Amino acid sequence: MGPKWLKDAVFYEIYPQSFQDSNGDGIGDLQGIIRRLDYVAELGCNALWVNPCFDSPFMDAGYDVRDYKLVAPRYGTNDDLVRLFDEAHARGIHVLLDLVPGHTSDQHPWFKESAKADPNEYSGRYIWTDDAFWGMEGRPYIAGMTERAGAYMLNFFASQPALNYGWLDPHKPWMSAIDAPEALATREAIKDVMRFWLDLGCDGFRVDMADSLVKNDDGCKSATCAIWRDIRTMMDADYPDAALVSEWSNPAQALCQAGFHADFYLDHHFNGYNTLLRDYETEGGDHSYFLKDSGGSIRRFLADYLPKYEQSREYGYISLITCNHDTPRPARTLSAAELKLAYAFILTMPGVPFIYYGDEIGMRYLDVRTKEGGYQRTGSRTPMQWSRDEGMGFSTAPAQQLYLPLDASDDAPCVEDQLRDADSLLSEIRRLTALRHAHEDLQADAPFSVINDDEDAAPFVYRRGKMILAVNPSSREKRFEDGLLAGKRLAYRIGEASLADGCLKMPGQSFAVLA
Ligand code: NOJ
């Protein structure tokens, strides 16, 4: 199933702009991340995903890459990144970079060449029609901006032209087949980028929009999956310890067909993950499971999750996340007490969990002006709140120079305060990650099954390996009695959960682990 280290991996996602500024220019950088590696290790995270840190005009926060092989000067140098790998490895931390294979910036030299009228080596690197007037069969495109006669396809924002991996069903002269030389050349160019960073010491990649490579791919994305399998073959042969994590959110494709080691369970409206933490867009109120007394049921999560889990568990891992740089922070609607239960669940489920920087202290979703193509995502991208010092320990730059404003409220959560408080969210999450590392049954592989999901009078009870876990997000006491509990002892609890005479008592908002 891939690299062994994934079995006990707990990831920490770092948005480099906002984590730690080391040179006082108001924006985070690689030296800043290095400075905080001990914090990451003490949090119990043994792997990092760093959002794109490559040269870019930053029209989409770096997901518009201008040079795949160069660290953006605002973050430091390639040598700094290699130092980050080394320093992380010295602490037992693996580092994934963010690979953006579906598009580049329109400032990338490949694109500039491809936009020239005279045919050249890069003419086929992107998807172009041969006529500037007839659009692109309903797909987003830009025409009229280039010397080359034709329209080029977009993969995301206007600044992100789609790289050409070919079409499953090339039915126009300008569409490349998936095995056309120009489509194969794109694939080799991306492999070359991967090799470049793997050779320098990175431990793999989180892959952006991994399902977006081949156009007109059929419903099961067979041609895109075939490309990833080819890439996985390269990894297995030459970098067997490196990991590939997909932004796909379809484990049947990403894990079973494409060969990714892990796939994010993303926040999509009304999917299982959404019902746990972020159900607020549903008509009729927010029934998020972890929102106290919301009336939400774990069954909505299970109905979506269980078939995916059963289908893919032999192939790879589903990654539950606290949040990411694209979604509202969970603290937008959940209190610290609710977040503790949600994180306890995320950190005791199978697969490979991810904590988004700042979620461990309950950083808020802020109402801030858009930055670098963030739009409503920007509120989840504000600077890390380390201390009560000026700049909250993020930066010594004057407030108006910061990448984004800090949380200005008097009770803005910060690391320093929460480290001093055994009852804080941060302290809880540190205990939870320690618990996971201490028990193989709570890690990626141990089987998961449901013991009780009838929550009228009982908590939700689930099994991981030989351990039994229970959670009660409501305000009412619930009880669970069963012969299964015989011989078990409480190994961890949140709230006053108790176990006596084969009866598990779970007061409102509690969590228990029985070993
Ligand atoms: C997904 C990334 O997470 C998001 O931040 C980005 O804007 C798009 N892909 C486009 O690369």
Image: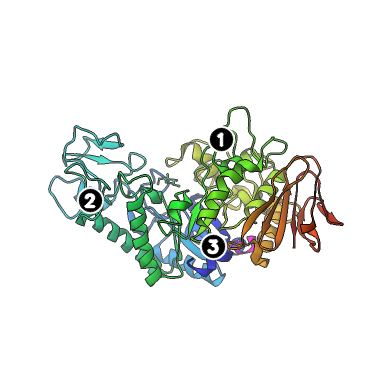
Labels 3, 2: front one:
2
Q: Which residues are magenta?
A: 41-46
Q: Nearer the viewer, residue 388 or 279?
A: 279
Element marked by disc 2: loop
Q: Quadrant of the C terminus?
A: bottom right
Q: Is residue 28 left or right of residue 489?
A: left
Q: Is residue 484 above or below residue 475?
A: below
Labels 1, 2: front one:
2
Q: Residue at x 78, y 42 (%)?
A: 457
Give the x, y percent position of residue 274.
57, 41
Q: Is residue 501 left or right of residue 55?
A: right
Please give the residue where the numbered disc 1 appears in the rendered image.
Answer: 367
Q: Pointer 1 and pointer 3: residues touching (CB < 8 Å)? A: no
Amino acid under label 3?
Ala
Q: Magenta stretch: residue 1 in it?
A: no
Element marked by disc 3: strand
Q: Which mark is residue 177?
A: 2
For the residues marked 3 and 2, what is the alpha-carbon distance in whole angstroms?
38 Å
Badge 1 or badge 2: first in the primary sequence: 2
Amino acid under label 1?
Asp
Please give the residue where the numbered disc 3 appears in the rendered image.
Answer: 47
Element marked by disc 1: loop
Q: Nearer the viewer, residue 264 or 123?
A: 264
Amino acid under label 2?
Ala
Outermost residue, right direction? 501
Residue 66 visible in the displayed image:
no
